[in-house]
Image (cartoon, helix red, strand yellow):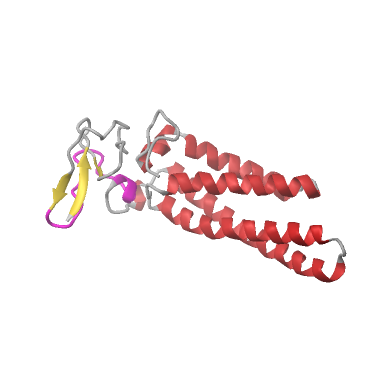
Amino acid sequence: MTNVTVCGKCGAVSLAGVRFCFACGGGLTSNTPAVSTSGQMPTPALNPQTYGNGAGTIPNAAARSTEITLLSVGVAVTAVITLLVSIDLLRWAYTDIYYYDDFKWLILDGALGLGYGAASLTAFSVARGIWFVEPWAWKKACIVSLSVLGLIVVSVSFSGISGLDAFGVIGQACILGLLSLSSVRVLFGRSPTTLFQGPN
């Protein structure tokens, strides 16, 4: 038994609990969820080339929008780069134990290394969530990008800006810009007009 909601405006089908139609952006709060007895998600009346759990249908790579592809790839690249940075910082933290009397650098490198590591592990999961348009992935992607920007600010305040820092800031700004597009937000069941209104 799979609960779904049919948009009364355009007829597109979304998972029950999603508050905004992925196809037209209309509110779904007044619609009555329908139940599929076959266990299969019904095909939307309109926009049959849909995809992902946010849209409520089986993933269809041919219908995946360019924005979703760019977001997923961007977050995946973020995951890889932050993992490499984390490994490098933890290596430096280990070196600090033996070569520096000032434990400030040990604490700083260790804390930043762990922070980048946590961001990396989360970003791998979020990249997959975005690829399959999971409703939770939008908010988690925002959190990852803002966290990475915060880590960069801390790093720059102690060590100065580097080319990698500048690349990171530009990359995360692009990801946040894509996430803020109304055409992207509605795919995750979020409001097309209110930035933070939608699934947690």
Question: Taken as a whole, is the magenta stretch helix, strand or loop?
Answer: loop
Q: Nearer the viewer, residue 181 or 98?
A: 98
Residue 16 located left or right of residue 118? left
Residue 102 located left or right of residue 20? right
Q: Nearer the viewer, residue 155 or 47?
A: 155
Q: Position of residue 112 (x, y in %)?
A: 69, 56
Q: Nearer the viewer, residue 198 or 162?
A: 198
Q: Nearer the viewer, residue 58 or 34?
A: 34
Q: Position of residue 52 (x, y in %)?
A: 33, 50
Q: Quadrant of residue 90?
A: bottom right
In the rendered image, residue 100 lying in the magenta stretch gets the answer: no
**The magenta segment:** 37-55
Q: Quadrant of residue 93?
A: bottom right
Of the 4 image quadrants, the one containing the C terminus is top left
Name the residue at 59% across, 39% down: 173
Name the residue at 18% across, 55% down: 40
Q: Residue furthest top?
A: 193
Of the 4 image quadrants, the one containing the N terminus is bottom left
Is residue 161 visible in the rendered structure shown here? no
- In the image, is residue 49 above or below residue 196? below
Residue 34 located left or right of residue 20? left
Q: Position of residue 174 (x, y in %)?
A: 57, 40
Q: Position of residue 105 (x, y in %)?
A: 80, 59
Q: Residue furthest left?
A: 37
Name the residue at 29% across, 31% down: 26
